[in-house]
Image (tube, rainbow, N blue to C red):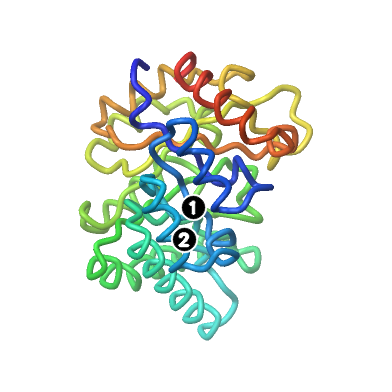
Amino acid sequence: MDSITRLSLNQITTERAGLGETVDACARHGVPYVAVWRHKLAETGAERAVRLIRDAGIRVSSLCRGGMFPAATAAERAARIEDNRRAVDDAAALGAEVLILVCGPAPDRDIAAARRMVADGIAALVPYAAQRHVRLGIEPLHPAFAAERSCITTLHEAIALAKKFDAATVGLVADVYHIWWDPALYDELAGATGRLVGFHVSDWLVPVRDIVMNRGMMGDGVIELRRIREAVERAGYLGAIEVEIFNQAVWDTPLDTLVPLVKERYLACV
């Protein structure tokens, strides 16, 4: 890439830092966007977070996470819809372009029923999100996460699910860590034209020691990052590109070392 104007620092990449510290580091090092996580937002408080971000001149690319729709009882499912409405409120307050939906696993062994609960949950949330002018981004996760984090595991099913709803409110998020392996990747991205609302980058390290914490800095793994970015752009997505890395060594890196490295690798590899 030849421009830094789309770069977003996803807050999970700076997990050891508070929201204020991350925002300040973005401002110091010329990163125009931050992607906020709800647990960090709760630590800071929504009103203070809005002020911190506004005063730093930083924009919010997304809020993570909504979703987690499947549950064993109707009461639990209703409570999760209500929590998602609060997430929509937070996204609207922050001026976030999208609320990321990590859709949730099956509460028992019935993954097909869980997928139906996800569709029903999104349908229940859509009118509120549309009213608040927040887009919902369905993020398919790697199949290794199906039992714990999301029963939506491929671009194909995420696209099919998104297309049940108005494109102005529901789209999908392409995270290279979760989709790079898919033999139909480029065909599926082409079929997602007009539906992409987010793009996340990191790298897949080998050998894999911990599937959650296995993300590496761009260029340290096996993912064809630039080719995927180009396909995402051909599908019409020209928004923020989030660097989202779950990795203990990255988390342990001081911000004033980490953020310049993120910029360097983003420019070199994405």
- Which of the two discs, 1 and 2, sits closer to the camera? 2
Q: In the displayed structure, would residue 209 be above or below residue 23?
A: above
User: How many other residues sit within 10 Å of disc 1, few (<14), some (14-19) or many (≥20)?
Assistant: many
Marks 1/2: CA–CA distance = 10 Å
Choose between 52 and 251: the one closer to the eye.
Answer: 52
Name the side, left or right, on which 50 lies relative to 18.
Answer: left
Q: Which residue is mark 2?
A: 49
Label disc, if present, on residue 36 of the rendered structure: 1
Q: In the displayed structure, would residue 189 be above or below residue 92?
A: above
Q: Earlier in the sequence, mark 1 or mark 2?
A: 1
Choose between 139 and 245: the one closer to the eye.
Answer: 245
Q: Dividing the picture into quarters, in which one does residue 247 lie?
A: top right
Q: Amino acid at mark 2?
A: Ala
User: How many other residues sit within 10 Å of disc 2, few (<14), some (14-19) or many (≥20)?
Assistant: many
The reply to whether discs 1 and 2 touch (Cβ–Cβ < 8 Å) is yes
Q: Secondary structure at mark 2?
A: helix
Task: State the image coordinates of residue 152 (x, y, percent, origin top left).
Answer: 49, 51
Residue drawn at x 65%, y 67% is 108
Residue drawn at x 50%, y 55% is 102
Name the side, left or right, on which 134 lies relative to 120.
Answer: left
Q: Secondary structure at mark 1?
A: strand
Name the side, left or right, on which 185 lies relative to 202.
Answer: left
Choose between 165 and 240: the one closer to the eye.
Answer: 240
Residue drawn at x 60%, y 37% is 245
Q: In the displayed structure, would residue 44 be above or below residue 146?
A: below
Task: State the image coordinates of residue 15 (x, y, percent, origin top left).
Answer: 65, 47
Furthest residue in direction right, as rendered: 209
Q: Dividing the picture into quarters, in which one does residue 252 lie?
A: top right
Q: Amino acid at mark 1?
A: Val
* Quadrant (top left/top right/bottom left/bottom right) for the N terminus: top left
